[in-house]
Amino acid sequence: MELSTKLYILSDKGQKFMGAGVLWLLERVEETGSLLSASRSMGLSYTKARAMLEALEENLGRAVLDRKKGGAERSGATLTPFAKEYISLYRDFQSEVKADAQKKFEAFSSSVSKLMEEKDEH
């Protein structure tokens, strides 16, 4: 047996707005400098990627992208300083929760094994 966890943060209305997919999207934007490039590299439509980040911004009450408009390049995006710190905090939070869940799972698994051994003896 092994444990698989998925961690989401929900809005007050019960809607997912933060999870691994949003984290990966933010990381790709940081790597590529573009929401369009990030979404394409993940196999997401630009509309879906934009909606994911808009939901994040709405629930956090802060911008996570600085979008470039106008000029010769007319496109591109970078993460705000807030977004970079948020990503770091989320990664730490996610790691801690998964480590705690793994410890609890190991205790559970051990108890199940003992129970099975007891039942086999009877």
Image (spheres, rainbow, N blue to C red):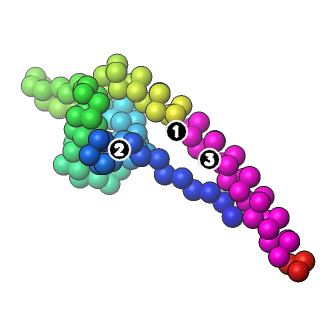
* Front in this rendered view, residue 114 or 53: 114
Q: Position of residue 28 (x, y in %)?
A: 37, 38
Measuring 17% from the left and 32% from the top, which residue is drawn there? Answer: 75
Q: Residues within 10 Å of mark 1 (few under 14, many from 20)?
A: some
Looking at the rendered image, the quarter that the C terminus falls into is bottom right
Q: Position of residue 48 (x, y in %)?
A: 23, 50
* Front in this rendered view, residue 99 or 41: 99
Residue bearing the label numbered 3:
101
Q: Is residue 107 above or below residue 98?
A: below
Instruction: Identify the magenta region.
Output: 94-119
Q: Main secondary structure of the magenta part?
A: helix
Q: Is residue 117 above or below residue 10?
A: below
Extreme residue toward the top, this view? 81
Q: Secondary structure at mark 2?
A: strand
Measuring 35% from the left and 44% from the top, which residue is drawn there? Answer: 10
Q: Residue 62 sits in which quadrant?
A: top left
Is tag 2's residue or tag 1's residue first in the polypeptide sequence? Answer: 2
